[in-house]
Image: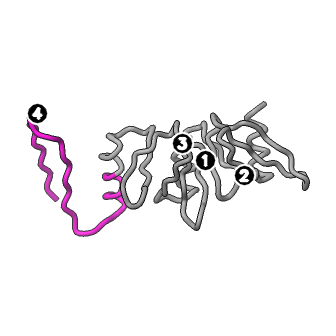
Amino acid sequence: MKFKLLINPHKNEIVQAQVHQKSIFTDNLEKFVLTNGNSNSIIGYDDKDHVILQLEDIVIITILDNKITAICINNKRYHLRKRIYQLTNELPNNFWRINKSSIVNKIYIDRFEETKTAGVNIVMKNGLSDYVSRRCFSKIRKELK
């Protein structure tokens, strides 16, 4: 493998890598380049176009139509190419796992509602609602104390 760095302040910046096949390394390199190494953002996809999503704009990450989807404050939806468990480990502390298929940004929580079956739903400020599993709710309750 060769590495070449050309510094020319009069040209547009471009990062180009020529590889034999796509790998975890190339995915991580692509993410790093597209986010400029900023850990406060994540790559989403809108009709195959890369979109850099700021974490503070994400309200909920959930599974819709068998795809991991990030729903932002403007109610736009973007597909993510990571699994929920991977995102749980990578996201900062202001994101809570509320069930097997959803993660919410606690900044955008409006309220918790009790259901008729003694369960709990979470209602977000943009009107979205999802159920909270018992296991996750006990962790959230401990954190709220």
Viewer-side label of 3, 4: 3
Q: Are marks 1 and 3 in contact (CB under 8 Å)?
A: no
Which residues fall within the magenta stretch? 1-30
Dominant secondary structure of the magenta stretch?
Answer: loop
Q: Earlier in the sequence, mark 2 or mark 4?
A: 4
Q: Which residue is mark 1?
A: 60
Q: Which residue is mark 4?
A: 9
The kind of residue tagged 1 is Ile
For the residues marked 4 and 1, what is the alpha-carbon distance in whole angstroms? 40 Å
Q: Mark 3, residues whose alpha carbon is within 10 Å: few (<14), some, or many (≥20)? A: few
Looking at the picture, tell me which residue is in the foreground, 134 or 52. 52
Looking at the picture, tell me which residue is in the foreground, 102 or 59. 59
Viewer-side label of 1, 3: 3
For the residues marked 3 and 2, what is the alpha-carbon distance in whole angstroms? 18 Å
Viewer-side label of 2, 4: 2
The kind of residue tagged 2 is Asp
Name the image colouring: one colour
Q: Which residue is mark 3?
A: 74
Q: Mark 1, residues whose alpha carbon is within 10 Å: few (<14), some, or many (≥20)? A: many
Residue drawn at (65%, 41%) of the image: 126
Q: Earlier in the sequence, mark 3 or mark 4?
A: 4
Q: Are marks 1 and 2 in contact (CB under 8 Å)?
A: yes
For the residues marked 1 and 2, what is the alpha-carbon distance in whole angstroms? 10 Å
Residue 99, placed above or below residue 10: below
Q: Earlier in the sequence, mark 1 or mark 3?
A: 1
The kind of residue tagged 3 is Asn
Q: Secondary structure at mark 1?
A: strand
Instruction: Determine the image quadrant of residue 144.
Output: top right
Residue 120, placed above or below residue 7: below
Q: Position of residue 17 (x, y in %)?
A: 20, 56
Q: Secondary structure at mark 4?
A: loop
Q: Earlier in the sequence, mark 3 or mark 2?
A: 3
